[in-house]
Image (cartoon, helix red, strand yellow):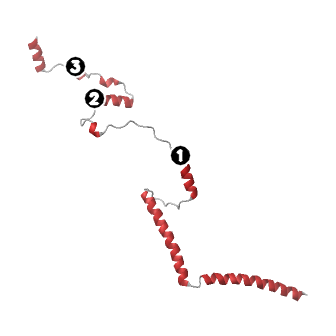
Amino acid sequence: MRALERAGDDRARSRRMAGELAEDWERAARFDDDAGANAALRARHRAGRRDARARDAAAAGLGLACELLPPSAEDARQAAAQRFRRRPATAQRVPLARQSIFGPGRAEAVGGLARDRGIARLALRPRASAARAPTPRVAARKRRRE
């Protein structure tokens, strides 16, 4: 009786081993041709290097010094969901053709400075040097008229 049970177990084990052995033979048959396996492996690596070079060129074009990952559907979805605010309108600059080559006048410059810095318009008052004594020539003319 014991011999029959052992024989049944041996048959089951041999069937299982035959299936595993067949899988091993199939796997070995795929790599039987060394040149074909090598060519397939080189083609796969070549495609990977080509993709990496394209991503590096895209990163360099954007001015990035890091490696870009391959694009994904999740990245595209998140990028489409982004909403950006518009910048507030700023005062337009005066074109160079309409500007004076000597720069803004004193009142414009001081007024702009006062406006920018919050300074009172004290600078627009006449300077003390403007109220100084007249030159000798001007004084002589004044005396002649009198």
In which quadrant will I find the N terminus?
A: bottom right
Residue at 48% from the left image edge and 66% from the top image edge: 52
Image position of 10 (left or right of 75): right
Q: Amino acid at mark 1?
A: Arg
Residue 8 left/right relative to 81: right
Extreme-left residue of the structure: 144
Name the residue type under label 2. Answer: Arg
Residue at 53% across / 73% down in the picture? 44
Q: Nearer the viewer, mark 1 or mark 3?
A: 1
Local crowd size for mark 1, using a 10 Å CA cut-off: few (<14), some (14–19), many (≥20): few
Instruction: Tell me the tag on residue 106.
Output: 2
Element type at marker 2?
helix
| Quarter of the rendering containing residue 145 | top left
Q: Earlier in the sequence, mark 1 or mark 2?
A: 1
Q: Residue furthest right?
A: 1
Give above or below for 108 relative to 135: below
Q: Dividing the image into 4 quarters, which one contains the C terminus? A: top left
Tell me the SS state at disc 3.
helix
Instruction: Answer left or right for 135 relative to 57.
Output: left
Identify the residue at image location x=43%, y=37%: 89
Q: Tell me the distance, in whole angstroms, between the alpha carbons under discs 1 and 3.
A: 61 Å
x then y, percent, for residue 83:
53, 45
Which numbered disc flags the more N-terminal residue, 2 or 3?
2
* Rendered view: 67 above or below 125: below
Label annotation for residue 83? 1
Residue at 47 percent of width and 62 percent of height: 55
- Considering depth in this image, is 36 or 2 the residue closer to the camera? 36
